[in-house]
């Protein structure tokens, strides 16, 4: 298969979908890998390294999209790439379609076969989301600590305090991969940490693993309201796989926070779980203020640490990219590979229930009635 790896052009996005090692694996499996010139620069990977590994460097996106049967990418297409998409082309990337009616419409109109990294699940784990969630979770606390400093717009508070002075209160909504990683860094820095989740099993595990060093709370509106009101740093880390994130922290709850408090809504890529987080921001201008509270809403946080995230992402996606290139979408469906769950749009139809529900579109099942999906 001819695999095309474009340069990421979302603001502040420095990742690339392949490393030289990944190119070598794909090429030795018999595939042709086209990489757009300069695509690795943000991750300090030179064209020469990719070319030495067996990739063909192509001058621009136009040629790459024209020749590639499969686009292997980090993020959804940028508006300037919409017209380059071709009917029947495979598009394999983070897509977050439930939060984006525009990209969903483009894939439907262009009849692209769109596979989302984040909707593939194996034994309840999202293997291609996990490494980016680990990174974003750890970053969330680090970034929150930065914005709590007075000169960065925050209330002027050291996350861990010092002996004799109370540390900051960190509240994490969602105790999954992002939440656990955010909580771990916050505890390591000495903050007081509360994790809120709807899954009691996860709360039990967190409590057991941390020996009372953090508070766990069951997710309901009154517990959330009480925790948010005292939070110096609130981290949004909730996920309904494939679906739009539920709005758990209301505008009234944000109003109850102290001036200079900080909210990092990591879940913004799926629509966000904070009512006042009504737009995304970018790495260049990451925050805005509402009711005196700093809001951080960057949907591609790992893009800021490409030397970590490009390699972590490639480790996680390469086995699936290889399978897709080897089998094509028809065999992926016929063999009921876990990768079939990644198919969100096919032949102009929506094959993911949550995406269909989010945009009130008809759901198209990949399997005839009565057979197990
Ligand atoms: N902004 C970024 O750069 C970035 C990077 C990575 C991940 N993310 C996003 O972060 C979010 C979390 O990802 P994850 O990998 O940690 O997911 P996860 O599935 O591991 O965890 C999500 C958690 O949310 C909990 N949850 C669901 N409904 C809830 C509710 N009503 N109240 C409280 N908790 C609830 C689940 O029980 C689960 O523990 C996702 O939206 C993901 O797309 C964003």
Image (cartoon, helix red, strand yellow):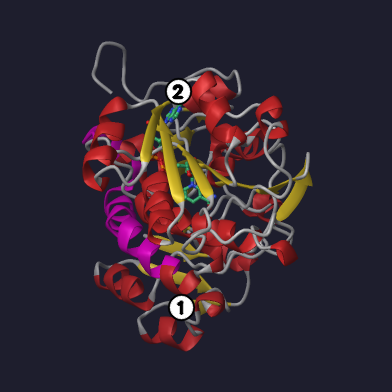
- Quarter of the figure that contains the C terminus: top left
Q: Which of these two is toward me, 68 or 96?
A: 96
Q: CA distance from mark 2 to mark 1?
A: 38 Å
Q: Which of these two is toward me, 169 or 110?
A: 169
Q: Is residue 152 visible?
A: yes
Q: Is mark 2 within 8 Å of ligand 1?
A: no
Which of the 4 quarters of the picture holds residue 31?
bottom left
- Neighbours of disc 1 within 10 Å: few (<14), some (14-19), many (20+): some
Percent x, y of residue 179? 42, 45
Residue at image location 53% in from the left, 33% down from the top: 227
Q: Which residue is mark 2?
A: 353
State yes or no: discs 2 and 1 in contact (Cβ < 8 Å). no
Label of residue 188 in the image: none
Q: Which residues are magenta?
A: 309-338
Residue at image location 67% in from the left, 37% down from the top: 257
Q: Count the labels in the image.
A: 2
> What secondary structure characterizes most of the magenta part?
helix
Circle 2 — which element?
helix
Percent x, y of residue 155? 69, 54
Q: Is residue 326 magenta?
A: yes
Compare marks 2 and 1 and give the one earlier in the sequence. Answer: 1
Q: Which residue is mark 1?
A: 56
- Neighbours of disc 2 within 10 Å: few (<14), some (14-19), many (20+): some
Residue 54's place in the image compared with 125, above or below, is below
Which callout, 2 or 1, points to the residue nearer the camera? 2
């Amino acid at each position: 298969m001819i695999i095309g790896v474009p340069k990421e052009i979302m603001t502040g996005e420095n990742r690339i979908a392949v490393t030289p090692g990944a190119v070598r694996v794909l090429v030795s499996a018999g595939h042709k890998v086209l990489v757009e010139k300069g695509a690795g620069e943000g991750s300090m990977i030179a064209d020469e390294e990719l070319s030495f590994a067996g990739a063909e460097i192509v001058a621009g996106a136009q040629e790459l999209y024209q020749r590639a049967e499969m686009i292997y990418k980090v993020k959804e297409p940028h508006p300037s790439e919409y017209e380059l998409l071709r009917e029947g082309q495979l598009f394999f990337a983070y897509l977050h379609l439930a939060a984006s009616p525009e990209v969903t419409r483009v894939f439907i109109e262009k009849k692209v076969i769109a596979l989302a990294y984040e909707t593939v699940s194996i034994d309840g784990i999202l293997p291609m989301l996990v490494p980016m969630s680990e990174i974003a979770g750890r970053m969330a606390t680090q970034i929150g600590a930065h914005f709590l400093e007075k000169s960065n717009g925050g209330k002027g508070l050291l996350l861990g305090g010092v002996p004799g002075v109370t540390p900051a209160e960190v509240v994490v909504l969602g105790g999954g991969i992002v939440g656990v990683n955010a909580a771990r860094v916050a505890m390591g820095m000495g903050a007081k940490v509360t994790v809120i989740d709807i899954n009691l099993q996860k709360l039990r595990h967190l409590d057991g693993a941390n020996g009372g060093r953090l508070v766990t709370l069951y997710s309901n509106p009154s517990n959330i309201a009480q925790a948010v009101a005292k939070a110096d740093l609130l981290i949004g880390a909730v996920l309904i796989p494939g679906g739009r994130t539920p709005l758990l922290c209301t505008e009234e709850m944000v109003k109850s926070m102290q001036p200079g408090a900080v909210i990092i809504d990591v879940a913004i890529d799926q629509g966000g779980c904070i009512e006042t987080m009504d737009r995304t921001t970018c790495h260049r201008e990451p925050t805005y203020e509402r009711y005196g509270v700093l809001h951080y809403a960057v949907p591609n946080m790992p893009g800021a640490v490409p030397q970590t995230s490009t390699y972590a992402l490639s480790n996680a996606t390469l086995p699936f990219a290889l399978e897709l290139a080897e089998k094509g979408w028809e065999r992926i469906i016929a063999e009921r590979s876990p990768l079939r769950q990644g198919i969100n749009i096919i032949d102009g139809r929506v094959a993911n229930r949550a995406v269909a529900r989010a945009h009130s579109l008809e759901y198209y099942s990949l399997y005839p009635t009565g057979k197990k999906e």
